Amino acid sequence: MDKKLLRRQFTLQFRRGNKLNFSVAMTAYILQVFVNLMISWLLQQFIDTSAGIDTGFSLQNLIFLSTVMVALLTFCAALIYFTKPKFISKAMRQYKDFAFSELTRKGIFAFSKENTATYISAFSNDAASIEQNYLLNIFNLVLESLLFLGAIVMMLCYSPILTAAAIAFVLLPVAASFITGNRVAEAEKEVSEKNESFMSVLRDGLSGFSVIKSFKAEAAAIKLFTESNKNVEESKCRRKKLGTVLQMLGTGAGLISQFGIFILCAYFAVSGKDGITPGVVMIFMQLMGIVTESIEAIPEMLANRKSAEALIDKMAETIYSNTREEGASVPAVLKDGIEISDLCFSYDGKEDALKNINFKFEAGKSYAVVGSSGSGKSTLLNLLSAGNSEYSGKITYDKTELRDIGGNSLYDIISIIQQNVFIFNSSIKDNITMFRNFSEADVKNAVELSGLSELISERGENFLCGENGNGLSGGERQRISIARSLLHKTPVLLVDEATAALDKETSFRIFNTLLSLGGLTKIIVTHALDENLLKKYDCILAMKNGVIFEHGTFGELMERKEYFYSLFTVSQ
């Protein structure tokens, strides 16, 4: 999709259901421009009246008009107070909501290939920059532009010659400011990229804190942090320098204009040419001040707006990269089974992790996938869950190719229990239901089957689990994961090394719970070769070097005394 069309999808979120707040606030800004220009005119009238020049207005008239202007300014300020913050708040909320909503449409595999620090930066620092340099700039840019045009028109009415001279003074610096604006956008993007890297290093340092301490790698961690911190601060410094250059150019233009025009005004006033009165000199200088301020502000505002647009483009490009086309909708059932035909897969395009696998997982049966490290167990499960679509051969669910099944339909068919269970910093119940509404009977049944009854009776269903479940044990987190899957009521349950980090007793209880569940097709990758558990599987697949070396029941495989027999014997 075209970059501008992608950006438009995001910028439309600023105005969706927000037009009234925007329109009222913008109207107030426009009225404010008129009042400010009128105040300049009133000052000229006051000065000329005080100098004894007939202006056509009495002092009482001018005082009354001044009171009206003050009242109008107060009215404008009140309108802006009530509407502008509402517009900004709703615009940013909708922008981030839309971005996150679009992000959740990505497939698991696409997201797993990306750096989460990119999104953390986009939703925090980049969003703050967009709020400041894009949304707030809309009002400031309109205000400064209208003040600039209004001041020029009034100056032309007073003296076309002086106005032409004023414009000539500032043309060159303004052009230089606009040219510099492109570099500001590039610098803003560089700041964003360096900040992503910094966020990534910070996240790694915090999540891997225990590893850093246990291996005494503090010095290396500090070095990585300081280097990344240095890079991001240096890029911010370059961005600030460019902003300073823009400001200096604008300030220089203002000084040149003010001194030049002041000298011309003084010359015309002394010589009595062109009807220049003391009041006209005063208002001309004030209007010139408005023009100068606008000249200082507008180029930087435009440059900042351009840099904000670059950040919006970056957000859009990141979210819409690696997206998976939505496939067909299929029933949330598994009647026949999952069939794999001539399945091959490689991570690097050179060496196959899976080689010509052919197998059928029949609906309603339990399967264990075992093998040594690197045999392809987790890779196989990852492909079954649509973790990667870049395989050759076929994977079909009830004769429908997996790549043709839409994401929403697929996750109505399968549930996944992994070794690392994510727990929200919310209640036990919320983590079981995943914030959805289920009947009390269904929740109670899932709690009992997953073995969570004792935990809930002790702590209550509203017990807060802590950040990523740090208030729970590993076994409790896994049982919550099982309860989620039971509530989800999918016909297929995929389990990947779910108890690898748990003690033997806890592991046994969890697997025993899973194998006792009826009516499900269960495919379980496991390293726990417990005879009592293995006998409960309908079939065991023993994988070696990316192939299914042998398969059968526990008794059949033990009688053959081949690869599985060796694995089991060594593990005892």
Image: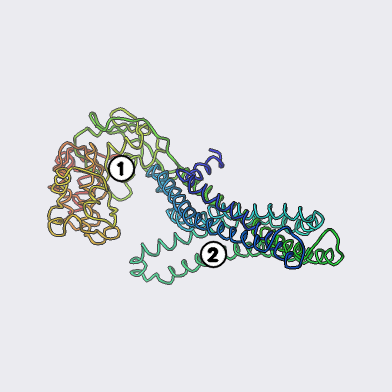
- Percent of width and height locating residue 407: 35, 37
Q: Is residue 572 left or right of residue 390?
A: left
- Percent of width and height locating residue 463: 20, 58
Q: Residues within 10 Å of mark 1 (few under 14, many from 20)?
A: some
Look at the image and tell me whether residue 462 can be seen.
yes
Q: Is residue 217 left or right of residue 449?
A: right
The three-letter code of the residue at mark 2 reads Asn
Read off the residue under disc 1.
381
Residue at image x 76%, y 57%? 172
Query: Dot 2: what SS?
Result: helix
The three-letter code of the residue at mark 1 reads Leu
Read off the residue under disc 2.
231
Residue 341 occupies quadrant: top left
- Percent of width and height locating residue 204: 40, 61
Foreground residue, 466 or 269?
269
Residue at image x 49%, y 44%? 19
Foreground residue, 23 or 352?
23
Q: Residues within 10 Å of mark 2 (few under 14, many from 20)?
A: some
Q: Is residue 341 left or right of residue 245?
A: left
Q: CA distance from mark 2 to mark 1?
A: 40 Å
Q: Label for residue 458?
A: none
Foreground residue, 114 or 430?
430
Residue 543 occupies quadrant: top left
Of the two numbered discs 2 and 1 in the rendering, the one whose residue sits closer to the viewer:
2
